[in-house]
Image (cartoon, rainbow, N blue to C red):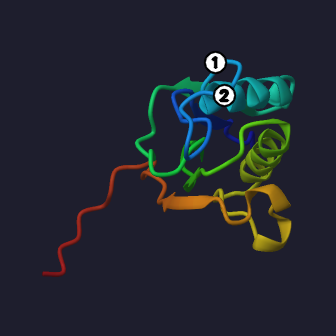
């Protein structure tokens, strides 16, 4: 059985920091993080990257979501945009892909994602729900 592909969604409009919308170079933190995630995920089997404009986590910056069909979705954020954060997100996405449910044991988490989890969303049902008649 083939594992479903895991997608990393990166908000490319996220602030650079709590204080600044853009970095000194003029790019948003989300743009910087997305570029690094794309570069590091290139060639990673079963991991793809998508950009979006706004994951609505504006009180935190540099938000991402790690998701796959039939698996738990994780939203992570409040990263310092750059290589270190991107490496942690890509590594976590690879572990998510290898997991049957998307849940990765804490002991396997890359250090760089610890403390950055914002939300865990249950997987959507892949089959129609069976009606219950026990009322």
Residue 113 position in % (x across, y down): 74, 57
**Figure check: 129 above or below 22:** below
- Quadrant in which the N terminus appears: top right
Residue at disc 2, secondary structure: loop
Residue closest to the far top: 26
User: Residue drawn at (64%, 24%), measured in percent from left and top?
Assistant: 31
Give the x, y percent position of residue 101: 63, 59
Q: Which mark identifies residue 23?
A: 2
Q: Which residue is mark 1?
A: 26
Q: Which mark is residue 64?
A: none
Q: Is residue 124 above or below residue 34?
A: below
- One can see residue 60 in this view: yes
- Asked if the residue under mark 1 is in contact with the one under mark 2, i.e. CB atoms within 8 Å, the reply is yes
Name the quadrant containing residue 46. Answer: top right
Q: Residues within 10 Å of mark 2 (few under 14, many from 20)?
A: some
Residue at the image point whose x is 34% and y is 50% from the top: 128
Tag 1's secondary structure?
loop
Q: Position of residue 64 (x, y in %)?
A: 59, 42
Query: Would residue 68 be visible to someone looking at this image?
Result: no
Q: How many marks?
A: 2
The C terminus: image quadrant: bottom left
Q: Residue at image x 69%, y 24%?
A: 24
Q: Kindly identify the residue that appears in the image at 63 percent across and 18 percent down.
A: 26
x then y, percent, for residue 17 = 61, 42
Residue 113 placement, left or right of 71: right
């Amino acid at each position: 059985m083939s594992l479903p592909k895991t997608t990393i969604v990166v908000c490319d409009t996220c602030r650079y920091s709590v204080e600044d919308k853009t970095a000194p170079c003029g790019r948003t933190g989300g743009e910087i993080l997305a570029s690094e995630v794309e570069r590091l995920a290139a060639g990673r089997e079963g991991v793809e990257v998508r950009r979006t404009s706004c994951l609505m986590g504006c009180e935190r910056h540099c938000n991402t979501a790690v998701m796959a069909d039939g698996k738990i979705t994780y939203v992570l954020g409040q990263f310092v945009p750059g290589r270190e954060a991107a490496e942690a997100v890509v590594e976590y996405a690879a572990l998510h892909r290898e997991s049957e449910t998307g849940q990765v044991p804490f002991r396997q988490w890359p250090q760089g994602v610890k403390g950055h989890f914002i939300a865990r969303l249950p997987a959507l049902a892949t089959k129609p729900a069976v009606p219950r008649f026990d009322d």
